[in-house]
Image (tube, rainbow, N blue to C red):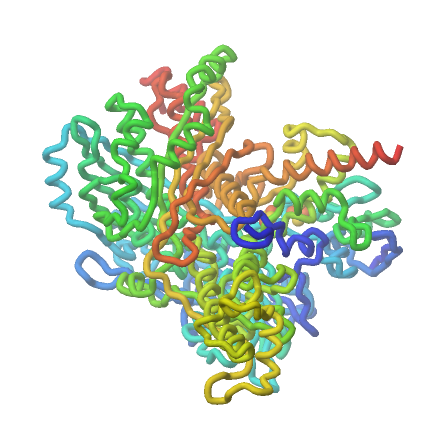
Amino acid sequence: MSETGIGASVKRKEDKRFLTGQGNYLHDIERPNQSYAYILRSPMAHAKINGIDTAAAAAAPGVLAVFTGADTAELGGIPCGWGVNNKDGSPMAEPKHPMLAEGKVRHVGDQVAVVIAETYEQAKDAAELIDVDYEELPAVVDMVKAISGDGPLVHDEAADNLCYDWELGDEAEVNQAFDGAAHVVSIDVTNNRLVPNAMEPRAAIGEYDKATGEYTLYTTSQNPHVIRLLMGAFVLGLPEHKLRVVAPDVGGGFGSKIYHYAEEAIVTWAAPKVGRPIKWVAERTESFMSDAHGRDHITHADLALDAEGKFLGLKVYTKANMGAYLSTFSTCVPTYLHSTLLAGVYTTPKIYSEVKAIFTNTVPVDAYRGAGRPEATYLLERLVSKAAWELGIDQVEIRRKNFIPKDAFPYQTPVALQYDSGDYDATLDKALELADYAGFPARKAEAAQRGKLRGIGFSTYVEACGIAPSAVVGSLGARAGLFESANVRVHPTGSVSIFTGSHSHGQGHETTFAQLVSETLGIPLDNIDIVHGDTNKVAFGMGTYGSRSLAVGGEAIMKALGKVTDKAKKIAAHIMEASEADIEFKDGKFTVAGTDKEMAFGEIALAAYVPHNFPHDQLEPGLEEQAFYDPMNFTYPGGCHICEVEVDPDTGVVEVVGMTAVDDVGRVINPMIVEGQIHGGLAQGIGQALLEACVYDEDGQLVTGSYMDYCMPRADDLPDFKAATTETLCAHNSLGVKGCGEVGAIGSPPSVINAVLDALRDRGVSDIAMPATPQAVWKALKAAETPMAAE
Amino acid sequence: MPSVTMTVNGKQVSGDVEGRTLLSTFIRENLDLTGTHIGCDTSQCGACVVHVDGRSIKSCTLLAVQAEGADVVTIEGLADGEELHPMQEAFRDCHGLQCGFCTPGMVMSAVDLLNVNPDPSDHEIREWLEGNICRCTGYHNIVKAVKQAAQTMRGQAAAAE
Ligand code: FES
Ligand code: FES
C-alpha cells in the first residue's frame, strides 16, 4: 500500500485552511457593491394575507427594494423532485410552493416579503415597518388530526391534507403469512422530528452581469448543478448557460443543503432589479424555521413469527409529515428510501408497507442524514428486540436466526431491493467482541451496586445508499437521473486537476479523491487538485447526499482516470515505438514489456501537449478525459451497533457508557476519514435517541426555535466511540466501496433505545419514545411503579 | 458613530462602529478576519470564540466598544507564520474537524483550556468544550486532539525549562 493511495489514513489536504481561518464559506464572500436582504417571515402557522403595506419600509433609510408574493406570483413554485402515486395510480397532491407567500402563509417562518438595503441592519429594521394584514386561521400540526376529515386544510387542493396514500407489497398475501403465525408482535413508534442544524447557517448571494446577461448564485449547497437545474428551469426560467451556481466551502449539510430553497431564487431574481449583488445570510433562528426538518414519522408495525422465532411476515403502516410544502426529495423519503428497506438484514419473506404522506402547518420535512433508512431501521430493530423479549429469546440469537446468510447474495428482498453483498454475522461477531458482551452481566451487577440500572441494546442493520441507479429511480418517480460526472485534466507538467460533481462539505473529498488519483497515476498528492462546487468549472453533477460521493462520484473519477491511462498508453506506445498492447503502466511509469524502456507519467503528459510528431489520424494531442458513471444498483453497507447505558432511577438521566459500531462499508479508502464519518453519524443518532426533538405547540408555534430549547449533542453528552469496520466488497463497482456517511445515524438510535429499555425492563417499563430525556425516563419509571397513577 | 481601538493579532486596529456592533461583526466585517464564524444568534454555539486579554470568549457576547483597548487574538493569529500551533497540528493529526465551521472557535477554546489546565482529563475536556457545538465530528476526535496538543505543549514547556 502506498502512503498516499487506497487504504492509507492520509491527513486531510483541506485542514490547513480550515484550521487557520482561511476557509471560504458563503458568509465570508463579499461581492463588489453588494447589498443585503432580510426575509420577513410569518409569525403565524396558518393565516390569510389580506394585504401587505410596504410603503413605510420602502421609504426607510438605505432601502433599495421591497418585494412580496404579488411581485413573484408569475414565477414558478419551488419544485418537488419526485412524484409518488397513490394506491389507485393517481398522482400525489402537489400544491404550489411559492417563493414568497401568495395570499396565505402555511407555517411559522414562511417567507412573506424581502427587504433589500445597503446594510443588513437597515434591511432588518425596515422589515419591521411592513404591515401585513393577517387573518389567522386554525392550524393543524398533528398528523392524525390533519387526516381526520375535520382538520383545517393546509392547501385547498389537498383533500384531507393528504399528499399521497401509497403502498408497497400485497397486503392480502402478507395477511396469509400472519394466519399461520405462532406469534404476532406489534409496536407503535414515533420517529421524532429533528432539525438538521449544520453549524453554518444557509446563505446565498445573487448577482447579475448586465454585460453578459449571466446570473451567478453563490449558495450553501450540497449540489450546485441540481440547484441550477431546479431554479433555472422550474422557478425563474433561466437557461443554464446564463446561470452559474457556486457552492464554496460549505459548513455541513446532512441533507438540509440538498434542497432548492426560496431564498436562492429570491436573491437571484431580485439582483437585476436592484442592479447590485444581494447577500442573504440566515440567522440561526431562521434556520430553525426554514431549513427542511427531518424524520417525523408515526408508525404501527406487526411482525409475525413462527414458534422458533423465525420471521414470517411484516406489516408496516406509516404516517409521514411533509410539513406545509413539498421540499425537493420529501416525497421519496418515506416511500422509496424507507419502505424498501423493511427487510433489513433479515429473511422475512412477506412484507407490506403503507405510507400516508400528510400536509401540516409546519416547516417542510425532507431527507436528513439517513433519510427514511433510520426510520425503517428504528421501527424494525425496536420490533425485533421487542419480539425477543416477549418470546424469551436472546437478543443476539433472534437476529442470527433471521439473518440473510452470507452465501445468499445477491439477495432479492420482497421489497424491491437486491442486496449485492454482506456478512451480517461477521459484523455482529466483531461488535460483540469489541463491546465485551460476555462481560455485560458483571458490569450490570456492578452498576446495580451503585444504584444504577444498566442496559445493553442492539441494532443490526443494512442500508441502501450510493444513490442511485437512474433507471431504477426513474421507474419509481424520480424526475432526475442520479449518476455522477468527473473530468480529469492532466496538465503539461504532469499535475492533475479533477473536476467532480460531488460536493464536499466536511467529507474530505479533497483528500479521499486525491488518494484515488495518487493510487491510479502514481503521482504525489501535492500534484493533485480536486475542484468542485462551481457549475462553470465542473461539467455536471448531482452532488453529495445518500452516501453517494465515493460509490458514484469516486467511480466516475475512476472511469475518467481509466480513459486517461488508456490514452497515455497510446502516447507511450507511439513514443517508445512499441505496440500498445505491450505497454504496461505501474507506479507512475510506462514500460514496454520485455524491454528496459520506460517513461514517467509526467513525460507522457508533456508529450501530450507537445505533439510534434503525433500521427494526426490516430492520436489527438492533450490529455483530458470526461466520464459519467451511473451505478447499476444501490450499495448496501450494514453492520451492528451495540449501545450500553446506565440509567439513574432517581433522576431519569441516561448516560451512554458504551457505543460500539462495527460497519461494513466495503473497501475503505481512508480509514481515518471513514471513522470520523461514523463518529459523526453516531453523535446524531444518539442525539435523536436521547436529546433532540423539534416541538410545535397546538397552534403551530415552533417551541424549539433556538439552541436554548433544541437540545444539540454537546461534548459532555457523548461517550468515546468504539468504531471498527469489516469488509465485503460492493459487487458492482470497481472500487468495491459502499459508502459510510449515514451508517452511524441509521444504525444507532434503536440500539440506544433498546439499551434504555433493557435497563428499565426489570422495573416494568416496556416502551419509551425518543428522545428518552431524563423527564421521559423518570415519568416512565414512575408510571410503571404505580400503574393506576400513570397520567 | 463611536470609534474603537484595540490590538488584534498583534496589530493595533481602529474603526468606526455602531453602538450595537458586536465584536464578532467588527472582527469579520471591519477587519475582514472571517475565520471567526457566526453559528447562532443566542451565544450558544461557540463558533465565534476568540481570545480577549488572554481568555477565550464568545465574540458575539461582547460589543465591539467593550473591547476598547483589549488585546484580541483570533484564529488567524494563532499560528506562528507557516508553523501551526500545536493545537491546530493536533486537530489535523487526529481528524478533529470535518466541515471546519466550528473549528476556529473550538481550537481557540481548547487553547485556553490548556492555558488554565495543561493536563486535562477526557472529562475535563468534554466539560470545557460544552459551549462549542460541533455537528460533524461527534467530539471523539476533538477530545483526542486536545489531549495530543496537551502532551505536545507540556513537552515543549518542559524542554524550555
Ligand atoms: S455565534 Fe457566538 S456563540 Fe454562536
Ligand atoms: S467540523 Fe463541522 S461543525 Fe465541527
Q: Is residue A378 above or below residue A279?
A: above
Quarter assignment of residue B13: bottom right
In this rendering, would A784 be left or right of A57?
A: left
Residue B4 image position (x, y, % from top left): 85, 55
- Which quarter of the rendering shows the C terminus of chain B? top right
User: What residue is at 75 percent from the left and 40 percent from the top?
Assistant: B111
Q: Nearer the viewer, residue A209 or A48?
A: A209
Quarter assignment of residue A472: bottom left
User: What residue is at 39 percent from the left and 39 percent from the top?
Assistant: A639
Residue B46 image position (x, y, % from top left): 66, 44
Q: Is residue A54 something one can see in this rendering?
A: no
Q: Nearer the viewer, residue B129 or B4?
A: B129
In this rendering, would B56 be left or right of B127?
A: right
Q: Is residue A255 something one can see in this rendering?
A: yes
Residue A516 image position (x, y, % from top left): 52, 59
User: What residue is at 86 percent from the left and 47 percent from the top?
Assistant: B70
- Which quarter of the rendering shows the N terminus of chain B? bottom right
